[in-house]
Image (tube, grey):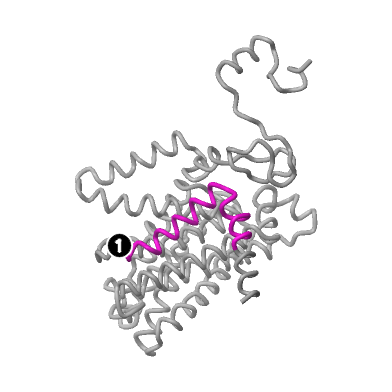
Amino acid sequence: MAGLTRYLVWLWREFKGEILVLPGRSILFFGAAALLALPLVVRHPYVLRVLTMSFIFAVFAASWDLISGFVGQLNLGHAIFFGVAAYTSALLNLHLGLPPALTIPLGAAASVLAGLAVGIPCLRLKGQYLSLATLAFPIILNGLLFLDIDLTGGELGVSGLSRLASSRLGEYYAAAVGALVLLLIMWKITDSKLGLIFHAIREDEIAARASGINTPLYKVLAFCLSGLFAGLAGGFYAHYMRIAGPSTLSVLTSFQPIIWVIFGGVATIYGAVVGVFVLFPLVEVLRVAPELRMLLYALCIVLVLRFMPEGLAPWVVDRLERECPRCKEHNAFTRRTCRVCGTPLAVPLEKGQAARGARSGSVPGTAEGGR
């Protein structure tokens, strides 16, 4: 009993010190908790369907952010990972009778192989050439689907797959828990030494190579990791929709995660999640005005990017948190000193203070202003 009490005290301290200390993390944590508890209040099948799809697409969008946002390899053909996993899971389930618990990981393994197939030929390509090359892969594969209609189903795809769970509620929690675990893994990857290497390659590949980093190896690894997580999302999608069709390899499927990530915030992981959970339900809400649906959708994206060029999530975080000028740790906007090193944090000036500082040629509170 004493050991359990000590563990609970330690858990509370970790939760308080790592989650509650920052507003951004608190919003994400309580948002995830609210989504997990939502079916206890709302069990409408349509609402559960929209949220289940949002969880799946959040993983898909975050996987694009991993390769394009963190490594700087602009992938315009991300649908190849999604589609390969969807078709692999579907064919294994339909022809071999394997359960989703096996077909989804096997589909993700096929996506990793697709990542190798895309990453190795594109090692020497950069910029727009890399983007166009990656765009070609899903288009080519989409054409190959029609060479054996008996196997792939042609335009109709492969249907009649096993469900993720026996009920809508079970499918919702399978997608929700799976998505939260995968998103946490991606976040930990980007926050590790590997994430620092990805950042270095994105900022200056020549300098990274000069400092001893095997950049070709890490770029291929990034493609494989991105393919792994996108493949898991594709497998979940195929079994949830119970079909894998050519739409999983379409150009629209490749561009959707780009829109979601840029809207939510690039190179953040959580920005991709925010983008999906705002834009995907928004499309469904706008069905009340079908003639203006896409116009209003596009207008919303344009307005957010006009006034929040770095994305919705970073814009909110920048107003709720402040970075320490010394140790670069983030702090709540209510703090006046850094929670790690104790350095005084810059306090936003009032209009009167700013005006007096401008007239005197210095800012009050600085060394010049003090003199």
Indicate the amino acid at tag 1.
Val
All told, the count of numbered labels is 1
Task: Locate residue 145, reporting x and y percent.
Answer: 37, 73
Q: Foreground residue, 47 or 154?
A: 47
Q: Is residue 116 above or below residue 334?
A: below
Q: Position of residue 215 (x, y in %)?
A: 70, 60
Q: Going by the picture, which residue comes out furthest to the front? A: 2
Main SS of residues in magenta: helix
Left or right of 243: which side holds 305? right
**137 or 325: nearer the viewer:** 325
**Residue 322 vertical position relative to residue 153 in the rendered view, above or below:** above
Looking at the image, the residue that sits furthest to the bottom is 96
Q: Residues within 10 Å of mark 1 (few under 14, many from 20)?
A: few
Magenta stretch: residue 55 in it?
Answer: no
Q: Could you tell me which quadrant the N terminus lies in? A: bottom right
Q: Secondary structure at mark 1?
A: loop
Q: Which residues are magenta?
A: 12-40
Q: Nearer the viewer, residue 177 or 277?
A: 177
Most foreground residue, 221 or 194: 194
Q: Is residue 16 magenta?
A: yes
Q: Looking at the rendering, which quadrant does residue 116 occupy?
A: bottom right
Q: Position of residue 231 (x, y in %)?
A: 47, 70
The image shows residue 246 at horizontal and vertical percentages of: 34, 68
State whether residue 231 is above or below residue 286: below
Q: Residue at x 56, y 58 (%)?
A: 66
In the picture of the structure, the residue carrying the numbered disc 1 is 41
